[in-house]
Amino acid sequence: MATFIAHVNVMLRPVINDPQGLAVKDGLHSLGFEGVTAVRVGKRIDITVDAESAAAAETQVREMCRQLLANPVIEDFEVGVMEVTSA
């Protein structure tokens, strides 16, 4: 069994209003960053998991996202998995 780290990015779907993103955009404009045309705010979750393979780890993490980490009605998620190696 190997250890893997999964990086999960959860974002609101494009059709969902993002008030936090709008607030960040307005804040950036007030700081002089007028070239900013859009901001979307999401969350990143790092999960360390033991599994037989990277594919098995990804399957587990995707199921975690479907059951708990992301709201499938309004959010999309992306999962990246890599093996943890000893230094």
Image (tube, rainbow, N blue to C red):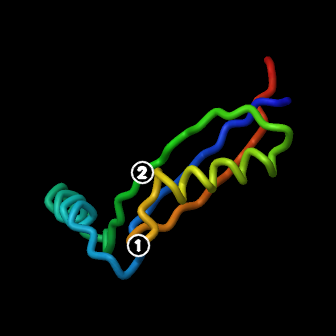
User: Which one is in front, 81 or 52?
Assistant: 52
Amino acid at circle 1: Val
Residue 43, numbered label:
2
Amino acid at circle 2: Lys
- Residue at 18 percent of width and 61 percent of height: 23
Is the C-beta separation of discs 2 and 1 under 8 Å?
no
Residue 57: x %, y % from top left: 74, 45
Residue found at the very far top of the displayed protein: 87
Q: Nearer the viewer, mark 2 or mark 1?
A: 1
Circle 2 Cα neighbour tier, 10 Å, few/some/many (<14 / 14–19 / ≥20): few
Q: Quadrant of residue 5?
A: top right
Q: Give the Cα distance between marks 2 and 1.
A: 16 Å
User: Which one is in front, 60 or 82?
Assistant: 60
Which of the two labelled residues, at mark 2 and mark 1, occupies the earlier sequence position? 2
Residue found at the very far bottom of the displayed protein: 15
Q: Which residue is mark 1?
A: 73
**Left or right of 38 on screen, residue 11:** right
- Residue at 31 percent of width and 71 percent of height: 35
Q: Quadrant of the C terminus?
A: top right
Residue found at the very far front of the displayed protein: 67
**Left or right of 79 on screen, residue 26:** left
Residue 40: x %, y % from top left: 35, 65
**Left or right of 55 on screen, residue 46:** left
Residue 64, numbered label:
none
Q: Secondary structure at mark 1?
A: loop
Q: Quadrant of residue 31?
A: bottom left
Q: Secondary structure at mark 2?
A: strand
User: Which one is in front, 46 or 57?
Assistant: 57
- Residue at 80 percent of width and 19 percent of height: 86
